[in-house]
C-alpha cells in the first residue's frame, strides 16, 4: 500500500510511518499545478505528492471546438512570475510553440477619464534578479487553458513522476485534522486526512470514495475554497459594489504590444494583447447595473438571436466609447486655483508626450468575438494562511487572498506564494527539518506582501472613485519622477527589490 511504501522513510528527517503522502495539493489550476511542479524535485526516494483536481485531465487543445479565438479567461503575468514560478521549461513565445499562447507587452499606458494625466510604464522600468539586459517585455497575457495544460504536461514528464500522483475528477468530501503523534517530539503536528470521491472510474456513476493521509495539505482551490470553509478558517473581506465584465474582442487594426488602461469613476477599463494581434481581451470594472445591462442574454430562437446580436453591437459601441476617449487635456472651470492646477497639469501631460512619444489611441473594436463573462469584485484575505490548530493545512493563491483586478496582480500574488513556500520547503529539507516548522515564516512573509498590494490597489480605486482634486496632477508627477515610477512598476510586477 501507499502507507507501507511511505514507511521506508526519506529525506528531510520526515517521519512517514503513518502517512500516505508527504504533500497533498487540492486544486489543479495554475497555482496548484505550479506548486506541485515546483515541489516535484523534492519528491524523490519515498517522498510522495498527490494533486487532487475536481475537473478532467488538463490537455490543450481540447478535443472539440474552435480554439483560434483566445479565451477571455486569461492572466497578465510579470516576468518574475514566469521565471520563478512557471519556469523556463514552459516557453514564452509570441505564437503557439509548446502550446502556450502568449501576448507580450513592453509598455503599459494608463490615463484618466476626468483629467489630462497619463502614466506610462515600460520594460525599462523593471529588472528581474538585477538583470534586464534580455528582458523584452513588461508583462505577458496568457490564457488559463494552455498554461494549466503545459504545467500538467511538465508534471507528467518530471523525473520524479512516479512519486507524483495526479488525480482528476476528484471531489473532496471531508477534511480532518489528525491528532498529534505522541511518539514524536512535542513540536510535531498530527497531519491531515482527506476523503474524496474519485469520479474518474467508468465502473460506477457514483464515484469511488477514497481516504488518504498526508503530513501537509496545501489548499489552492480558489476564492471559494472548500478546504478553508470546511476547516472554519476565517476571512476578512470587502465588497467593492462593482462587477468586472470581460470578453475577447476582434480588432479593426492589429493590437500593438501595449496594455491599455483607462481610469474611470466606476473602475478601470483595460484592453490587453493576446497571442494573436487580431484579438484583444477587455476587462471592464463597472457597476452591477451597467454590467448586467451590457451582458448579452443567451439566444434560443430567432427573436432572441436578433436581440443577442443587437446587445453585442451595443456592447461593442460602449467599449469603443470608453477606450477611444483620450485624456481630457482641456477642462473649462471658473475657479482660478483649479485653473492654475489644470494648466500646470496639462503642461506636464504635454511635456511627457514630447519626451515619451504621443498618446497612443487603442485600436477600434470591430466586434465581440467570444462569450461575455462577469464576476463580483471583492478584496479578501484569510486571517491565517496556516491553520491555527494544526500546522498541517496551508492556504495559497485565491484560497488565501483576492485583490482588485486593476493591475492584474491576483495570479502574480498566488505565484509569489508558490515561490515563497517552495523556497522555505527546500530550506527545511536541506536542513534536515520537518517542512511544517517553517510555515509561520511563510505566513508572515506572504501576509505582509499581500496586505501591502491590497491596500495599494484599494487606495488607487478609492482615489478615482471619489475623484480627489489632486489625483490627476499626482499621476503626472509620478510619471515625471522616474525613480518613483520605476518603484511602482517594480512593486506591481514583483521585480527589482520587490522580486519574488
Image (cartoon, rainbow, N blue to C red):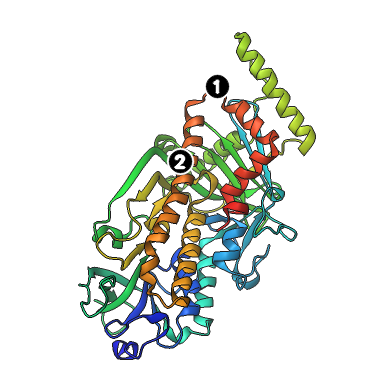
Eye-nearest disc, 1 or 2: 2
Q: Horizontal placement of 303 versus 314: left or right?
A: left
Q: Name the residue under label 2.
A: 455
Task: Write the residue at 70% across / 51% down.
Answer: 123
Whether 359 is drawn above or below 451: the answer is above
Task: Write the residue at 32% across / 82% down.
Answer: 15
Q: Which of 446 and 182 is in front in this view?
A: 182
Comes first in the chain, label 1 or label 2: 2
Circle 2 Cα neighbour tier, 10 Å, few/some/many (<14 / 14–19 / ≥20): some
Q: Quadrant of the N terminus?
A: bottom left
Q: Which of 364 and 466 is in front in this view?
A: 466
**SS label for mark 2:** helix
- Marker disc for residue 227: none
Circle 1 Cα neighbour tier, 10 Å, few/some/many (<14 / 14–19 / ≥20): few
Q: Which of 232 and 222 is in front in this view?
A: 232
- Marker disc for residue 469: 1
Q: Where is residue 43 in the image (x, y as percent from the top left)?
A: 45, 81
Q: Horizontal placement of 339 versus 433: left or right?
A: right
Q: Where is residue 50 in the image (x, y as percent from the top left)?
A: 38, 77
Q: Where is residue 7 in the image (x, y as percent from the top left)?
A: 31, 89
Q: Horizontal placement of 23 versus 133: left or right?
A: left
Task: Write the residue at 57% across / 27% down.
Answer: 471
Q: Which quadrant would residue 52 be assigned to in this image? A: bottom left
Whether residue 53 is visible here, answered yes or no, is no
Task: Using the numbered discs, state the Cα–Cα distance from disc 1 to disc 2 in whole angstroms.
Answer: 21 Å
Whether 491 is drawn above or below 359: the answer is below
Amino acid at each position: 500500500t501507499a502507507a507501507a511504501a511511505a514507511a521506508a522513510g526519506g529525506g528531510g528527517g520526515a517521519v512517514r510511518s503513518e502517512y500516505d503522502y508527504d504533500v497533498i495539493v487540492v486544486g489543479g489550476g495554475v497555482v496548484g499545478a505550479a506548486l506541485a511542479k515546483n515541489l516535484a524535485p523534492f519528491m524523490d526516494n519515498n517522498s510522495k505528492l498527490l494533486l487532487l483536481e475536481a475537473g478532467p485531465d488538463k490537455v490543450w487543445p481540447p478535443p472539440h471546438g474552435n480554439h483560434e479565438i483566445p479565451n477571455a479567461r486569461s492572466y497578465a503575468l510579470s516576468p518574475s512570475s514566469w521565471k520563478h514560478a512557471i519556469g523556463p521549461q514552459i516557453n514564452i513565445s509570441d505564437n503557439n510553440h509548446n502550446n502556450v499562447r502568449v501576448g507580450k507587452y513592453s509598455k503599459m499606458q494608463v490615463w484618466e477619464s476626468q483629467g489630462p494625466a497619463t502614466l506610462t510604464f515600460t520594460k525599462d522600468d523593471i529588472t528581474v534578479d538585477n538583470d534586464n539586459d534580455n528582458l523584452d517585455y513588461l508583462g505577458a497575457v496568457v490564457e488559463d487553458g494552455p498554461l494549466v495544460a503545459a504545467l500538467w504536461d511538465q508534471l507528467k514528464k518530471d523525473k520524479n513522476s512516479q512519486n507524483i500522483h495526479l488525480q482528476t475528477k476528484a471531489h473532496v468530501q471531508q477534511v480532518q485534522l489528525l491528532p498529534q503523534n505522541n511518539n514524536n517530539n512535542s513540536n510535531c503536528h498530527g497531519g491531515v486526512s482527506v476523503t474524496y470521491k474519485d469520479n474518474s472510474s467508468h465502473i460506477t456513476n457514483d464515484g469511488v470514495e477514497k481516504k488518504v493521509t498526508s503530513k501537509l495539505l496545501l489548499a489552492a482551490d480558489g476564492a471559494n475554497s472548500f478546504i478553508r470553509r470546511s476547516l472554519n478558517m476565517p476571512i476578512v473581506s470587502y465588497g467593492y459594489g462593482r462587477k468586472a465584465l470581460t470578453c475577447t474582442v476582434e480588432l479593426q487594426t492589429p493590437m500593438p504590444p501595449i496594455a491599455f488602461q483607462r481610469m474611470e469613476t466606476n473602475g478601470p477599463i483595460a484592453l490587453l494583447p493576446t497571442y494573436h494581434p487580431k484579438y484583444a481581451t477587455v476587462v471592464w470594472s463597472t457597476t452591477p447595473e451597467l454590467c448586467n445591462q451590457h451582458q448579452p442574454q443567451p439566444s434560443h430562437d430567432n427573436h432572441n438571436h436578433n436581440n443577442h446580436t443587437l446587445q453585442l453591437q451595443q456592447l461593442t459601441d460602449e467599449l469603443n466609447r470608453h477606450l477611444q476617449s483620450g485624456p481630457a487635456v482641456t477642462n473649462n472651470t471658473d475657479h482660478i486655483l483649479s485653473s492654475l492646477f489644470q494648466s500646470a497639469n496639462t503642461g506636464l501631460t504635454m511635456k511627457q508626450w514630447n519626451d515619451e512619444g504621443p498618446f497612443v489611441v487603442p485600436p477600434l473594436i470591430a466586434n465581440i468575438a467570444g462569450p461575455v463573462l462577469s464576476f463580483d469584485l471583492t478584496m479578501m484575505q484569510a486571517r491565517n494562511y496556516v491553520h491555527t490548530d494544526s500546522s498541517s493545512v496551508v492556504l495559497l493563491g485565491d484560497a488565501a487572498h483576492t485583490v482588485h483586478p486593476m493591475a492584474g496582480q491576483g495570479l502574480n500574488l498566488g505565484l509569489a506564494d508558490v515561490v515563497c513556500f517552495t523556497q522555505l520547503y527546500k530550506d527545511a529539507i536541506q536542513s534536515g527539518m520537518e517542512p511544517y516548522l517553517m510555515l509561520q515564516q511563510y505566513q508572515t512573509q506572504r501576509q505582509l506582501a499581500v496586505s501591502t498590494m491590497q491596500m495599494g490597489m484599494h487606495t488607487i480605486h478609492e482615489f478615482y472613485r471619489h475623484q480627489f482634486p489632486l489625483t490627476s496632477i499626482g499621476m503626472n508627477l509620478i510619471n515625471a519622477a522616474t525613480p518613483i515610477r520605476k518603484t511602482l512598476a517594480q512593486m506591481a510586477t514583483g521585480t527589482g527589490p520587490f522580486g519574488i
